[in-house]
Image (spheres, rainbow, N blue to C red):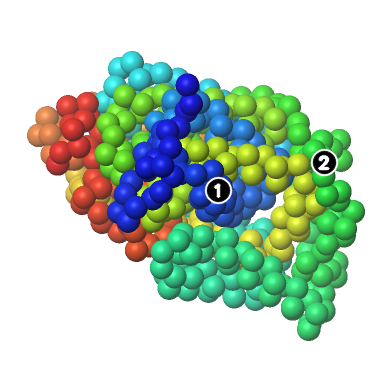
Amino acid sequence: MAIWQLHNHGVLEPGAVVAPKERLSWGKTIGLGAQHVVAMFGATFVFPLLMGLNPQLAVMMSGVATLIFLFLVKHRVPSYLGSSASFVGVATAIYAQGGRPDHVSGAMFWCGVLLVAAGLIIHYLGSGVIHRALPPVVTGAVVMLIGFNLAPVVAATYWPQDQWMATIVMVVVILLSVGLRGFPGRIAIFLSLIIGYLLSWLADVALGPITRVAADGTVTEALRVDWTKVHEAAWIGFPPVTDLANWTFGSPDNVVGFHLPNFNLGFALIAIPVVIALIAENTGHVKAVAEMTGDDLDPYMGRAIGADGLTSMISTFAGAGPTTTYAENIGVMASTRVYSTAAYVVAALVAIAFGFSPKFGAVISATPGGVLGGITVVLYGMIGLLGAKIWKENKVDFGNPINLVPIAAGIIIGVGNVSLDFGGEFSLGGIALGTIVTIVMYHVARAIAPAEMVAAAEGATIIVDAPGAYQTDEIPAVGVSAPSRRHRTRPEDSDGSE
């Protein structure tokens, strides 16, 4: 039996909705698939760059992950799975402690394992179990400290490479994000990267090379855009194999690609807190899709979260970054009202095809550091502010000491990279220690507080708006209130009522 039924003989009438298990003609479906590729493309290759991983391999594995996800959710939850921004801070922290790309993959692998476990728990016991352990005040704090923990990376790594180009690109990101409407606004970061790339090339032509200071203090003169490896790369072939023996943090000569994960307990503890953010991301995505399609997808919530965990395990085992459901592609569905998973299959196949072009990967890897600096200064701040968005929409009361005191401690530890040394080579710090303090001390404070204080601290359940990074004409942006898209995630509120 065919997966998709042909919608209305392939004709899309004005105002008509194409269901996930329907499709238009294959010509139109391929066109829609191309839109999904553009929507996911920018973030899917930018985040691996920031994590020191191979963007060509990440794009390829995103296609593989999407196909697996659609199969596991029985084509009921249309979604593209791409690289997750939540792990950028994890990679940076691991490199800062002397880790290599295989240590990054090994740490992220365990996040996939825990996400599978969370998916199983939600599938069989309901989402209430997770939300009692991780209420909005805790979830918001963890997302916030993950984002703001990245601030030193911008200041020390990307921004100094070309401060004026970084400033220009930052301005471009802000202007495009706010000024563009509709679908172009949803790919503002991608467009900013292209503009920054071109401006860097023009600056090389007009102004010549710039002075660069390497991680080891070496000072060199170099062009902003160096296409030496682009010219050397083949048009067709597999991503390279990581040269771990000669890998050096921050070196432009690094060869990163396929590699097996290297498991380290200390690095795993840095990565594990990100699972909380991924659960929130996936929950928001499924709820938003349910709102748009009119389907009851609560029975598929655990399946979707578990599927994302499994694809993250597969992707990291190959040496790419973990995956997550993409808010970017919700904008495409909202604007077209076509929710057919056939379009996502097309997008996945196109991504896999891109993954077989080393030339494509080399062009991406040659992105100037100043351009990444301008993008990350906005992007990292947006990640952190998503935590504040969770607090605001769930009406978290910080006048209550249960919410205020333990959360304050956890955030400062996470943002300030405060560490706790246990002797030897093992220590906890930054994101890991901040998350542990936030979760553990919140529940300790709640356990010892007077009953009336506990009752006052129990506000709304988690409210999830349709996720997205930029404001559009079709769907609310992050930080924009959307009462019509709010859902309570407790089992008793599964009908979506307020």
Q: Which mark is residue 27?
A: 1
Residue 128 seen in render: yes
Question: Could you tell me how far apart the alpha carbons at marks 2 and 1 are, in whole angstroms?
Answer: 28 Å
Q: Tag 2's secondary structure?
A: loop
Identify which residue, 396 or 302, lies in the foreground.
Answer: 302
- Binning the other alpha carbons within 10 Å of mark 1 as few (below 14), some (14 to 19) or many (20 upward) gives few
From the viewer's perspective, is the residue at label 2 or at label 1 nearer? 1
Percent x, y of residue 81: 53, 39
Q: Which residue is mark 2?
A: 237
Q: Position of residue 79 (x, y in %)?
A: 46, 39
Could you tell me how many numbered marks the image carries?
2
Q: Is residue 375 left or right of residue 57?
A: left
Farthest front residue in view: 9
Which residue is found at the position 80% from the left and 80% from the top? Answer: 205
State the image coordinates of residue 41 (x, y, percent, origin top left): 59, 52
Label 2: how many Cα within 10 Å (few below 14, some 14–19, many 20+): few
Q: Among all residues in the image, which is located at the extreme left? A: 452
| 145 or 127: nearer the viewer | 127
Q: Indicate the amino acid at tag 2.
A: Gly
Who's the residue at 82% across and 36% down the image? 241
Q: In the image as oriented, which residue stretches furthest toward the bottom?
A: 206
Q: Position of residue 196 (x, y in %)?
A: 65, 70
